[in-house]
Image (spheres, rainbow, N blue to C red):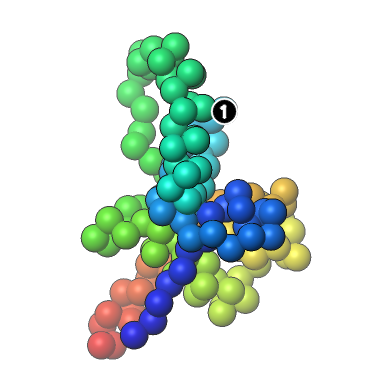
Amino acid sequence: MRTIEIWDDLDARAGRKVPAADTIQFCYGGKWYELDLSADHVIEFGKEMARWTEAAHKPDAPVPDRPAGIKPAPGGQRRAYWLALRTWADQQRLRNKKDPSQPAYMTTTGKMYYPVWLVEQYDAWLADQEEAA
């Protein structure tokens, strides 16, 4: 059996390993973001966002649930799915097409991003693994 550990992104930037309790996805400026956060940071994020969401209004046009190409993970296990995808991409040595010094799932500025081609390749690999099992 394999154990997957997910760390709080904010603490990781400060060099600390604190287990993440939840993954928060949000869209700002037309770009989607995802944060793995500890329980304390989830509460802090909610409090910070409340100021903005309480003043916000519903959009006039329909908004997609998730960015194009992003598929929900089987069984709702988003965090485990994205971690497994990153691990697989590293094992395959897949690189960012614009900046080959970065992994395929990182932008040139070092932020997480899952391009459609990467998700499709990983999903195809998963399907092959399931067929072989």
Q: Nearer the viewer, residue 54 or 120?
A: 54
Tell me the element at label 1. Answer: loop
Task: Please give left or right for residue 65 compared with residue 95 in the image.
Answer: left
Q: Nearer the viewer, residue 92 or 109?
A: 109
Q: What residue is shown at x 54% (from left), y 59% (from top)?
A: 18
Is any part of residue 52 visible from this angle? yes
Q: What residue is shown at x 74% (from left), y 59% (from top)?
A: 99
Q: Amino acid at mark 1?
A: Gly
Q: On the image, which quarter does residue 125 sit in? A: bottom left
Image location (x, y in percent) of residue 97:
67, 60
As displayed, is residue 87 above or below residue 24? below
Q: What residue is shown at x 41% (from left), y 58% (from top)?
A: 79
Residue ranking furthest to the bottom:
132
As displayed, is residue 113 above or below residue 119? above
Task: Please give left or right for residue 47 compared with residue 97 in the image.
Answer: left
The residue indicated by pointer 1 is: 29
As displayed, is residue 114 above or below residue 101? above
Task: Please give left or right for residue 87 compared with residue 59 in the image.
Answer: right
Q: On the image, which quarter does residue 91 sit in? A: bottom right
